[in-house]
Image (spheres, rainbow, N blue to C red):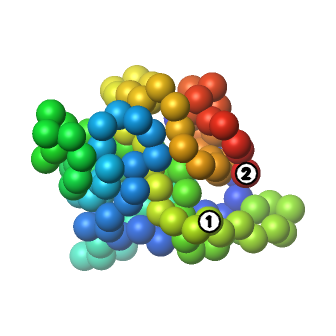
Amino acid sequence: MKGVSGKITLALNKGAILTCADNSGAKELQIIAVRSYKGRKRTQHRAGVAGLVWCRIYKGDEKVRHQIFQAVIIRQKKEYKRPNGMRIAFEDNAAIVVDEKFMPKGTLIKGPVAKEAVERFPQIAKLAAFIA
């Protein structure tokens, strides 16, 4: 995992519901943990764009429902700032399901993908239709 350029606002708490933007069989994901989160003592873990989280499948196919997977956040509603001063915000909070080697489980990604997520996880760029 590479570092992310820019100041990403961490806007998604533990327990947040995300839409799944790939065709892995999941419809909605719920964040249960944030990987490598460093914060204050006794505060909830938070994640932002290009963050790696542990999720449980909240809604989806019978085969994958209630299972736990890793996911990469590719969009968030809360705006964040890029190094050039531009502020970016998306219409929804979305993530894609990945495996242990950070390869996407699905074969296509619906909707735009944040440039910061592609910087950190280059495998996502191969499936992305639009990078914003």
Q: Is residue 105 above or below residue 10?
A: above
* Point 44% across, 39% down: residue: 22
Q: Quadrant of residue 75?
A: bottom right
Give the percent coordinates (x, y) of residue 43: 30, 76
Q: Amino acid at mark 1?
A: Phe
Q: Nearer the viewer, residue 53 or 107?
A: 107
* Point 62% across, 65% down: residue: 90
- For disc 1, the neighbor class at 10 Å (few under 14, some 14 to 19, many from 20) is some
Q: Nearer the viewer, residue 95 or 4?
A: 95
Left or right of 89 on screen, residue 72: left
Question: Label 2's element?
Answer: loop
Give the percent coordinates (x, y) of residue 4: 64, 48
Residue where numbered disc 1 is placed? 90
Give the percent coordinates (x, y) of residue 32: 23, 57
Give the percent coordinates (x, y) of residue 8: 61, 63
Q: Is residue 102 above or below residue 60?
A: above
Mark before the other along the chain sequence, 1 or 2: 1
Q: Quadrant of residue 40?
A: bottom left
Left or right of 111 on screen, residue 105: left
Residue where numbered disc 2 is placed? 132
Q: Amino acid at mark 2?
A: Ala
Tell me how far mark 1 sits from mark 2, CA to CA. 9 Å
Mark 1 and mark 2 residues within 8 Å of each other at the beta carbon:
yes
Whether residue 67 appears in this view of the structure is no
